[in-house]
Amino acid sequence: MPTPGSVIYHQLQSALDHQRLAVAERTRDVEMLDSQLKELVSRKGATLLELAQHYLPEFSRSSIETTFAEVRATLLEIMGRKERIHAELTARASRFVESCRKLEKDLDGITEQLNEHVRRRDDLERVVADRLKDDTHFQELSHDAAQMEARLQRNEARVLELQASAKEKLPPYEKSSLFQYLYRIGYGTSAYRAKGFLRSLDRWVARIIDFPKARNGYEFLRNTPKLMAEEVERRKTEFKGLMEEIEDIEYQITDSVGLTAVLEAGRKLGAKREEIVATLEKTRNELQAVDAELEELDQTQGHFYEEAIKKFEKFLSQTETGVLQNRARRTPDPRDDEIVSRVTELTAQIERLKPQIVDAQRNRKLAEDLAGGMDLVVNRFRQNNFDSERSSFSDSLDPDTELTRYLQGLTKPEEFWQIIRRQQQFQPNWAENMSAQGANVVLEALNNPALSRALVNATAQVVEGALNSMAQRGIERRAPERRVHQERVGRPRSGGHFTTGEGF
């Protein structure tokens, strides 16, 4: 049994939400380790200051405090720079996350309303179709339109045939200098004025090329296709008037049952949904860009700390290793040895923490990649209207298994999406169901977004036999002008979907 699209959507959205929580947890892990590293660096700086102060009897207190002040100020500036950037990016990311949550909530509400309007549209279109087929005047006009469409098709075919014939047969006439000469001087008409020998000569030439017959053929090829085309245009104008009468009946019924209002509201909701979907995608892209900056910042955390460590190394080479450690070994006082031991231990702790930070960043990156892939799938799901009530999925699709494979890294986001897409289909609307039940509706017409399903279905039920297809072709012929007319008078389009894609 097919699975409703809304069920699959909620499973995907739930997996996305879960993965976002995983990203948040991995981010907290990184921040915790980052805080620990910052604390260790700070403690090491304070311990070095304590060591330097221990040797105050042999050094100037002011010079030592000045040296440490410079190092500490540099470290604080480095850390402050990194933290300011991080805070700014985090604040931007939080705003985008909140915007996405609001947009998703709005989208869910719009989707629910659209599904309701789709149900009402289908119900009312069925009512309109029933009333049209029971209308005597509509029946008569539909038969007339079908017969006129049949004649138009024959006439158009004849015009094309004549035009092709003229294109093929006119060049020999136009290339014949004798024929063109006689035709140009009006031989055989009241306009001909030649006398005497010249008249005799022209008569002799005319007999050679059988000019009267040639002129008739030439004029037929030149004039008949144009005259036939003009006649076809005149009949098209008559057909247009006939179709407008049919549409007036349809519009009256459509307005009276409330379908017009539903169509108008549905179009607005559809436009709003697509606007929200587009805005959500844009916001998601902006959020991903900020996340990428945060990721890059975390990756360059090594740069910030490397910059700080270099400052320490310079200081240590000048003070700790160059003076302090040597002094500690030479002095009998064990206190300086204890302080140096603490510096050494803090340095070791910092080094042990670095790989943990790398692992935490790697885990967060993995969680972010999985969340980003799920986000892509959910966005495409919505963009293609797979979350509509008419959307369903083959029972051969096992979403839990596919989700597990994706989260285990066995399936890439694009592969995951293609697996889902291939198992999706939209359930037939009411008119297509009637066709499947034997209403003899031309499916091409039903699937044409420019046509009214109610009109197509009603016409198919009142015009039977060979004229049925002619009636449908006539509706299709009228479709472009019908749309222009609807736009001109401000009527909502009575064909197609509420959105650019299928589903609503």
Image (tube, helix red, strand yellow):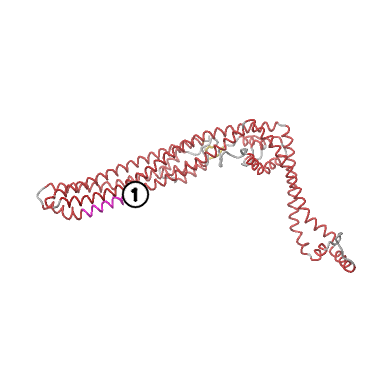
351 is higher (above) or lower (below) than 453: below
Element on which disc 1 rests: helix
| Side of 312 relative to 465 (left or right) | left
In the picture of the structure, the residue carrying the numbered disc 1 is: 299
- Residue 232 place in picture, x, y as percent: 75, 47
Q: Picture quarter containing residue 369?
A: top left
**Where does the magenta region start and end?**
296-315
Q: Is residue 20 visible?
A: yes
235 is higher (above) or lower (below) than 431: below
Could you tell me the amino acid type at mark 1? Gln
- Residue 198 place in picture, x, y as percent: 87, 68
Whether residue 305 appears in magenta in the rendering, the answer is: yes
Q: Picture quarter containing residue 437?
A: top right
Looking at the rendered structure, the number of numbered marks drawn on it comes to 1
115 or 283: nearer the viewer: 283
Q: Is residue 3 visible?
A: no
- Residue 57 place in picture, x, y as percent: 11, 50
Q: Residue furthest front?
A: 62
| Side of 182 relative to 52 (left or right) | right
Q: Residue furthest bottom?
A: 197
Quadrant, the C terminus: top right
Whether residue 334 appears in magenta in the rendering, the answer is: no
Q: Residues within 10 Å of mark 1 (few under 14, many from 20)?
A: some
